[in-house]
Amino acid sequence: MNARDEKYAVTAAQRQKITAPALDYRPPRVAGVPPKIGLIGCGGITKSHLTAYRDAGYDVVGLTDIQPERAEERRKEFYPDATIYDTHQELLADPAITVVDVATHPAPRAALVRDALATGKHVLSQKPFVVDLEIGCELADLADQHGVHLAVNQNGRWAPHVSYMRQAITEGLIGDVTSISTTVAWNHNWTKDTPFNDIPHLLLYDFAIHWFDMISCYMTGRSARRVFASARQLSGQEAKPPFGASVVIEFDDALATMHFDANARFGPRDQTLILGNRGTLLSQGPDLGTQTVTLTTDEGEATPDLTGSWFPDGFDGSMSELLVAIEQERPANNNARDNLNSLALAFAAMASTDIGQPIEVGSVSRMHDSWLTYRVEI
């Protein structure tokens, strides 16, 4: 056996099964009494919000929606003692409510967040946060002016596999990240009969924002330079937006790639491979909620026994991080300014798809009208 073979033989031998490091990947918890919460917008996704809040022991005392029957449905199922308000202004006037979850669609959201901040409420905003980075900065400034917190519900950060890998990177277990590759294949054709069908960049805007945000977290402190993306309609897809997309994100000394196939009717797959100069993280499974993480270093190969699932633990993590940040008087790690970095990646990807050229990150500051709906004439 030559020296090269001996080197790789030793490496293989070292990859014995070892105990996975115990990392703090679960949603945090406040030490004292959690503040009371109000919910603005009671659409379908808020079942996950309220399931998470109820399971965590949080008290939602007020709800409002432009369709009162939806608020009533949520109250009956989750918080029967909560008050239903006719308007968001009435909910914001309730002095018992300290934190507001704004869970509406993007169009009215910025105004609702602005109103909540102006009344001195801490806010958790639904994602994608804003359609204009300047408006996002203005809202973050407004929160600072009123001495309150503004966070974004990037719930993917607290999916158990994502959170574990985030913590592993933060603690230096794989050294400096050199590349990230993500492949997500699933069937998103259910959107054909929903308002989502009218969003041309549905994949890159509403869905992939989770993965843009994950990459921002994995690469904390390192600035992305350029994004090159492509999106295409796939044979046999039923929804209108392009259901295939690939994205390349360039850093000074690292590269991230993402591939999305939303027309995968058989054998769905979700996989992320993160390479570092001291180790590797691999997360893989059939869907967003079922994932196995493997950490490989010189010490061997470890597979943590993860507890929980993206739904509803991701929603627990988003709100819990905000509540703990309020209690500890520190910025939430899902704060609005941080989330603008993720949005800048998404905006650059959509622009790159349109022109077929790489886009510098930050050079596109707002969503074009043509990205938001097919019905707009350009």
Image: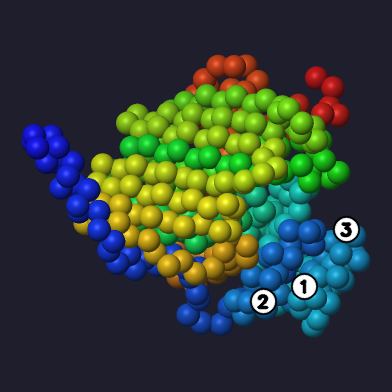
Q: Choose between 231 and 133: the one closer to the eye.
A: 231
Mark toward the start of the polypeptide (2 vs 3):
2
Compared to residue 346, the image places residue 370 above or below, namely: above
Q: Residues within 10 Å of mark 1 (few under 14, many from 20)?
A: many
Q: Assign the C terminus to one quadrant of the image.
A: top right
**Three-letter code, disc 1:** Gly
> What sort of colour scheme is used for the picture?
rainbow
Q: Count up the numbered dots.
A: 3
From this viewpoint, is residue 132 visible? no
Residue at 60% x, 24% y: name it.
230
Compared to residue 164, the image places residue 247 above or below, namely: above
Report the side of 182 relative to 35 (left or right): left
Q: Which residue is under mark 2?
A: 54
Q: Which residue is under mark 1?
A: 62
**Three-letter code, disc 2:** Arg
Residue at 56% x, 26% y: name it.
229
Percent of width and height locating residue 122: 62, 63
Q: Choose between 189 and 216: the one closer to the eye.
A: 189
Task: Determine the residue located farthest toward the front in the rendered image.
Answer: 1
How far, Cα to Cα, is label 2 from label 3? Answer: 23 Å
Residues tagged 1 and 2 counted as in contact (Cβ below 8 A): no
How far, Cα to Cα, is label 1 from label 2? Answer: 14 Å
Compared to residue 30, the image places residue 101 above or below, namely: above
From this viewpoint, is residue 112 visible? yes
Residue 66 has which mark?
Answer: 3
